[in-house]
Amino acid sequence: MSRVSAVSIVEAIASDIRSRVFSGELPALHALTETEVASSYDVARPTAKAAIEKLVAEGLLVRGVHKTARVADLGPESVRDIYQARAYLESEVLRRLASGKAVPEEAVRANNDIAALKTGAPLDVVEPDMRFHTSLVDALGNERISKMYLSLVGEVRLCMSRVQSLHLLDTNLIQAEHQRLLELIEAGRGDDAAQLLDEHLGRARERLVAAMGGEAGPEADLTSKLTD
Amino acid sequence: MSRVSAVSIVEAIASDIRSRVFSGELPALHALTETEVASSYDVARPTAKAAIEKLVAEGLLVRGVHKTARVADLGPESVRDIYQARAYLESEVLRRLASGKAVPEEAVRANNDIAALKTGAPLDVVEPDMRFHTSLVDALGNERISKMYLSLVGEVRLCMSRVQSLHLLDTNLIQAEHQRLLELIEAGRGDDAAQLLDEHLGRARERLVAAMGGEAGPEADLTSKLTD
DNA sequence: CGCCCTTCGATTGTCTAACAAGTACACAAG
DNA sequence: CTTGTGTACTTGTTAGACAATCGAAGGGCG
């Protein structure tokens, strides 16, 4: 019986389940029955139902009609879809930022944090990395775009919770590419920044796909994939 | 007592309320209490509650804690946010389509439909216009991007329901700019297409803002009149 | 006379209990 | 081995109820 209380019981339960999914405590395809959730949090079934439906709307859980909700099982095609969507959004963000030569301070800070951590724990890079990308998007100041990106970030974290060995990318390489992106923004070279980001995300995407057991797609060839 | 039955009662009620909001039958700030919805559709209150919460999640309704749900009142800043988000998304879409010189057939059809309607009813242009833009986004084949755009379209339609006199837009002008966009895609000139779209949406945005009582920005009359 | 405080109605958040309907799995029959 | 059936589990929906909270109306006091 976990105790949670915040602004709303439903939100508190949803938040707790969300973190348990991200931490990997609830593996993919794990079933989440309404009565089970209700009893484990000591609430009524409708409350548990609301929390589950909230997470289903976020994409963390999936369920069909009259079927138990399960932790989403994101296959390689989903990973590609998510990272492609990220690329679409962030490419345009970089162009707009570059056209104003606006380098977000928070992004600089986040990348410095990446450079600072010399620990071998591969998981520690995820948080500042996400903060870097999120701060770029937020710098646009568009409420809806930020919200959209937030939902993508949630799914990205869900992907990563499935891969224990996150030694997919070298920390130094990540930090260097981020630095380059910031420089391109400052130089007003939006097109180059967008292209670099495409490679940056494309590489991460295919590494992640491979780590998840999916057939490692033909590495990049970013120009031919747009209608596919 | 309206009769609705489809796949899910909640979804059916939400869908009906949605269309009533779009049609303007439910004006901005109109209150929608749970009991009121429940009795009008002859369902239990939790069912009505679920439908309302679904629409709140979509952004069509707004409500604070312990406050009755109301039809969203989108002010000028919200309209700008929405149209800016559209511009960000669609700009990148156009670039990607142009890089593959892929002109979606459905977009061509939709634009032909705009050209075909010579009726004076200004409302008739909304549907094919939305279909034009949506088909461009859908042509990317990215599930999440399409879903994001769909939610934006919903809010755009909500904006339009607030403006009775949709005579802001000249049908011929819209059709001509759409045609030009398609030509630029076919020519592979992504940057030019993105820029034209920015102007296209920017003017529409400021015209809509002005029609809603806000103060139009400088983009309102760059060349000639049109609204999207 | 006007302002602050209290009170009250209305509305939402949540609970308990229950029934109906659908799915999934096992088990038996052909 | 396939097919059909049946039972248990789960979800969809309803009803009624109580507590918490918000908004507004009304009374007390400066």
Image: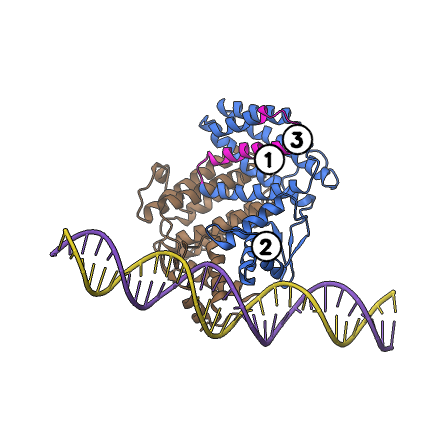
Chain colours: A blue, B brown, C purple, D yellow
Q: Is residue B164 visible?
A: yes
Residue position for label 1: B99
Residue numbers of the magenta segment: A114-142
Residue displayed at 32% across by 41% down: B216
Badge 2 and badge 1 both on one subunit: no
Residue B160 vs residue A195: left or right?
left
Seen in the picture, residue A17 relative to A86 is either above or below; the reply is below
SS of the residue at dot 2? loop
What chain does mark 1 sit on? B
Q: Of the residues shown, which amino acid type is indicated by label 3?
A: Ala
Q: Quadrant of residue A221?
A: top right
Residue B138 x %, y %: 57, 47
What is the spatial separation of the Cα atoms under label 3 and label 2, in whole angstroms? 32 Å
| Mark 1 crowdedness (10 Å alpha carbons): few <14, some 14-19, many ≥20 | some
Q: Of the residues shown, which amino acid type is indicated by label 2?
A: Met
- Depth check, front residue: A103 or C15: C15
The circle on residue A121 is 3
SS of the residue at dot 3? loop
The quadrant the C terminus of chain A occupies is: top right
